[in-house]
Amino acid sequence: MELRVYQAYDKDPIRMTRPNVFHRYAYAWLTLLFFGVSIFLHWLFGWYAYVSETAEHGQSPIVSDYLVTMLRDTFENWQSEFLQLLWQVVGLAYFLYLGSPASKENDDRMEAKIDALIRLNGGEKAEKLLAEIDETYLRKHGHAQPHPESA
């Protein structure tokens, strides 16, 4: 019996290659794009509001005053919203990566069962297939090791 790994949307076997940096970090690139566009639009509309406000007072806009105002507004938003969200998302992801007891998920047991099924049904090709899967998903030493607290 020959085992093959298939993509969900395609019937051709997956090429066992590592995805490039744009595919591996697509979410980060998209987030960076959203951030860049939103900060640009924030500053652009801030400029329009600043010019309008100075015109109401009969003054001409001064770039240095605009920069001070926009930096203040940007850092207020940064502190109140972005840093909190950053800590929640990145901090929790970091602790999940470390395997803290509060964020531990028990995927090790399921992965060990799947490895055992592949070894039972894969015959001689099982170890090679498992090594290819581990290489594809950047696991160099077989399935994930149990967390230190549960070992």
Image: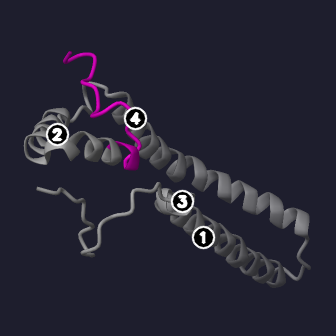
Mark closest to the chain's N terminus, 2 or 3: 3
Mark 3 highlights which residue?
Answer: 20
- Label 3, secondary structure: give it: loop
Mark 4 highlights which residue?
Answer: 140
Which residue range is magenta in the image?
A: 134-151
Mark closest to the chain's N terminus, 3 or 1: 3
- Label 4, secondary structure: give it: loop
- Crowding near pointer 2: few (<14 within 10 Å), some, many (20+)? some
The amino acid on which the numbered mark 4 sits, given as a three-letter code, is Lys
Mark closest to the chain's N terminus, 3 or 4: 3
Marks 1 and 4: CB-CB under 8 Å?
no
Circle 1 or circle 4, nearest the eye: 4
Look at the image and tell me in which quarter the N terminus lies.
bottom left
Q: Is residue 119 left or right of residue 56?
A: left
Image coordinates of residue 108 in percent, x first then y, are 19, 33
Measured in 3D between alpha carbons, the distance from the residue under mark 2 to the one under mark 1, in whole angstroms, is 45 Å
